[in-house]
Amino acid sequence: MQFSNFVSLSFPTENSLITQSRFMLLESVLIFFILLAVLSYLKFYNLQRHSYFSGSWWFWLLLTGVACSCAVGVKYMGLFTYMLLLAIAGLHFWHMIGDQNLSNVSLMCHFLARGLALIIIPVAMYLSFFYVHLTLLYRSGPHDQIMTSAFQASLEGGLARITQGQPLEVAYGSQITLRNVLGKPMQCWLHSHTNTYPIRYENGRGSSHQQQVTCYPFKDVNNWWIVKDPGMQQLVVSNPPRPVRHGHIVQLVHGITTRYLNTHDVAAPLSPHSQEVSCYIDYNISMPAQNLWRVEIVNRESDTDVWKTILSEVRFVHVNTSAVLKLSGASLPEWGYRQLEVVGEKLSKGYHQSMVWNVEEHRYGKSQEQKEREVELHSPTQMDISKNLSFMAKFTELQWKILTLKNEDTEHKYSSSALDWITMDTNIAYWLHPTSGAQIHLLGNVVTWASANIAALVYTCLSLWYLIRRRRKIYDVPEDAWQLWVSAGGICVGGWAVNYLPFFLMEKTLFLYHYLPAVTFQILLIPIVLQHLSDHLCRSLLLKSMFSALIVAWFSSVYFVYCTFRPVTYGEPSLSVTELKDLRWKDSWNILIRKQ
């Protein structure tokens, strides 16, 4: 009896896959491409034995690479299966090297063919996806703020309209706004206003009562600063301009209040282990100004690099204390207008993006008088210098954001841990009818998921048993059956492992749907185990008949569970409160019940 066709019915009766596909969510497309990649590679591998380099051989090999590229293009999770197939292909090629019937030229051709189809073409396709993406989507959008200033300035509209025509090189006398590179908890700019720190905080600690310096998440005239040469009094750019380079000492003068950016050995308001940052006010007390800062260009190519608008990422190191200007991310109380705290962090505590800033808006100051300067700060710039990023620069930044960006709201009503998925101790409510009890939940078929877990356990135990026995020169199954058991089962168990275990290392909000690619591989393992048990352990006709009857009973229970949960898979028909309560087979499931 062939169980592969029979057990394939478990996919159309798998409630979670139905729900996910009906909402057109990415996991369904991802599963399609990773299964297509696995199928294509197995087709290619079977042809490898007798008709390599034929048309069908090339077709399935190329389709494997194309499917892998599409899987990674849908979600980065596709990379797990891609890496698995690369490892399997590498292992198979390693075995080919030991084949004395293949010449060196033939081996080289096989190697180049696999490298072309499984590495070069997928990488080229993946790059092409984003080339088309970035070519078509060249305008500014509502979520640009998560990208760097350079990326935003390369888009049409938005920041590009503000920064177009800005001078490229920051010089002494430049008027600038400084954006924190981290962009968390939100994008913000170095800011000051006339208000001072409270003489004493709520916890009883005292402050310097100097002018507040914060990071403000909106465009504002109080975000403008003037880069001043400590050895000169002028606040305008000379002719020709004198550019600021890596390692130069500068003073940063607040454009509106003309006070100097300062830090000293006073504890910050919310980060007492860091130094307070302020704009210096002379109270005629024994607290002299400490307003010298050394410019360090983080992404410099040489130690003589010029500080550039948008492109340069810089740190400001305080000359007197070696503290680094840093965004702490804490929100100040009402006296600070809920703006974000800026502190002086000791350099010995290491490097972080919160210590890095870039010039976003920039003009060459021309007015020495304060009133004229305030008018100048509101006026547009005139010089025209392009700051377009190359495709590879945009591509690299976008990939990094995809990899590292995570939702700050780490808690969600339906979030779960990876351990909850195996036993399906969680669910997700996708839809609720506004008046009736009709609803849709992401819930798997309990029997199918339990069977998949049992199949994985049986496969692992049997494999260990066979390995021990084979070590003792005892061969319980024929060699061809053993190779099929290892290869087919290895792909399924390996596919489950690579699509599941990495989530234990991820610092992100996790949901049940993240487990769907892994459980798909587990379900594929069920017919492999059943077929092996039937062929090699059920030796008598009676045992085979009983085993077949057991499979029929098993599938009947799968279908029964599918029908039972069909109303919350398709959202119809509407169920009563009692019927909804009956569907709560586990206390951890959150079935929505309206209050009467």
Image (cartoon, rainbow, N blue to C red):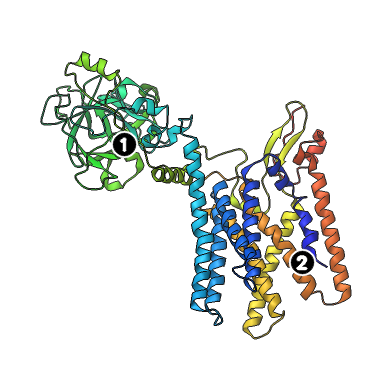
Q: Nearer the viewer, residue 540 or 41?
A: 41
- Residue at 34% over, 29% down: 189
Q: Quadrant of residue 538?
A: bottom right
Mark 1 is surrounded, within 10 Å at the Cα level, by few (under 14), some (14 to 19) or many (20 or more) other residues, namely: many
Mark 2 is surrounded, within 10 Å at the Cα level, by few (under 14), some (14 to 19) or many (20 or more) other residues, namely: some
Q: Which residue is mark 2?
A: 530
Decide: is 366 above or below 68. Answer: above
- Circle 1 sits in a helix, a strand or a loop, which is it? strand
Decide: is 465 above or below 421. Answer: below
Q: Gap in Å between the C-alphas at discs 2 and 1? A: 60 Å
Q: Which mark is residue 357?
A: 1
Q: Can you give x and y, in whole percent of width and height, for residue 144 in the image?
A: 45, 33
Q: Which mark is residue 174?
A: none
- Residue at 55% over, 75% down: 96
Decide: is 324 above or below 89. Answer: above
Quadrant in which the N terminus appears: bottom right
Q: Can you give x and y, in whole percent of width and height, for residue 101 in the image?
A: 56, 81
Mark 1 belongs to which amino acid?
Trp
Quadrant in which the C terminus appears: top right
Q: Can you give x and y, in whole percent of width and height, for residue 138 in the image?
A: 46, 34
Q: Can residue 541 be seen in the rendering of this structure?
A: yes
- Circle 2 sits in a helix, a strand or a loop, which is it? helix
User: For this view, does 66 lie left or right of residue 139?
Assistant: right
Q: Nearer the viewer, residue 122 or 152?
A: 122
